[in-house]
Amino acid sequence: GEDVEQSLFLSVREGDSSVINCTYTDSSSTYLYWYKQEPGAGLQLLTYIFSNMDMKQDQRLTVLLNKKDKHLSLRIADTQTGDSAIYFCAEKQTGANNLFFGTGTRLTVIP
Amino acid sequence: DGGITQSPKYLFRKEGQNVTLSCEQNLNHDAMYWYRQDPGQGLRLIYYSQIVNDFQKGDIAEGYSVSREKKESFPLTVTSAQKNPTAFYLCASNTPVQHNSPLHFGNGTRLTVT
């Protein structure tokens, strides 16, 4: 089965790094995604990583994948107030079209 | 510009009434999805459709119905049988034949039933 878990809240000061964590249980995951949701809006794809990779960097975003521990993290460098949002991790399993989402982590950036 | 349009953004209904949420995409995507979002919970799949004239139930289909008569459109009806319909509803689409096919989302419809 599928179970994707995230902590619900994270607060950081502007300029610090944020690290949002996610754990999943299904070892057949192929792709893992990070989405951002601003208030009252839909989900915006931030980045993704293929399950045979362990790291991906995209400007201020770094994704780390520990496949052995089924742990995924998203690091945001130099966090800005505009980064305040809910961040969802999601996994896509082999043969499935749908994604399975975590509960979302609400990131609050303190000026 | 390609995208997914959900309308209306806000919808208010009285208990006992059916209501239909619109979702249109011009991305030429084959598959479309409806999710429900409640505070503190992840997205839960209501229905999905991989091709025109075909759709499957998701994890929480009870009290909902859908149709897929056109590739571009996937309306969701919230019926009076849905016990707790107040929520934020998100429509998404993708092209599943591609290995990496992330979901593209609309901006959501917030439904309030009183």
Image (tube, helix red, strand yellow):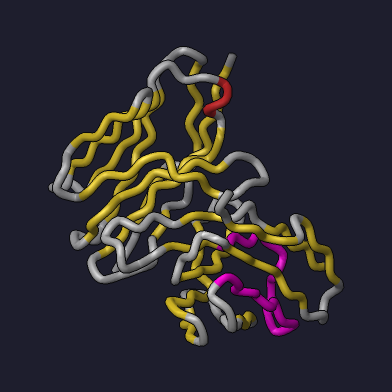
| Residue A56 falls within the magenta-colored stretch | no
**What residue lies at 32% left-to-right and 44% top-to-bottom?**
A48
* A95 left or right of B38 in image: left
Residue B20's quadrant in the figure? Answer: bottom right
* A37 left or right of B6 in image: left
Task: Pick out the residue farthest to the bottom.
Answer: B53
| Quadrant position of the N terminus of chain A in the picture | bottom left
Question: Residue A14: x, y in percent?
Answer: 51, 15
Question: Residue A56: x, y in percent?
Answer: 24, 34
Task: Pick out the residue farthest to the front.
Answer: B1
Q: Is residue B88 visible?
A: no
Please state which of residues A17 and B56 is positioned toward the viewer in this rendering. B56
Residue B56 vertical position relative to residue B99 in the rendered view, above or below: below
Q: Main secondary structure of the magenta part?
A: loop
Question: Residue B93: x, y in percent?
Answer: 49, 63
* A54 left or right of B52 in image: left
Please state which of residues B48 and B37 is positioned toward the viewer in this rendering. B48
Please state which of residues B82 and B89 is positioned toward the viewer in this rendering. B89
Please state which of residues B99 and A5 is positioned toward the viewer in this rendering. B99
**What residue lies at 35% left-to-right and 58% top-to-bottom?**
B101
**What residue lies at 20% left-to-right and 35% top-to-bottom?**
A55
The magenta segment: B72-91
Q: Is residue A90 visible?
A: yes
The total number of labels drawn is: 0
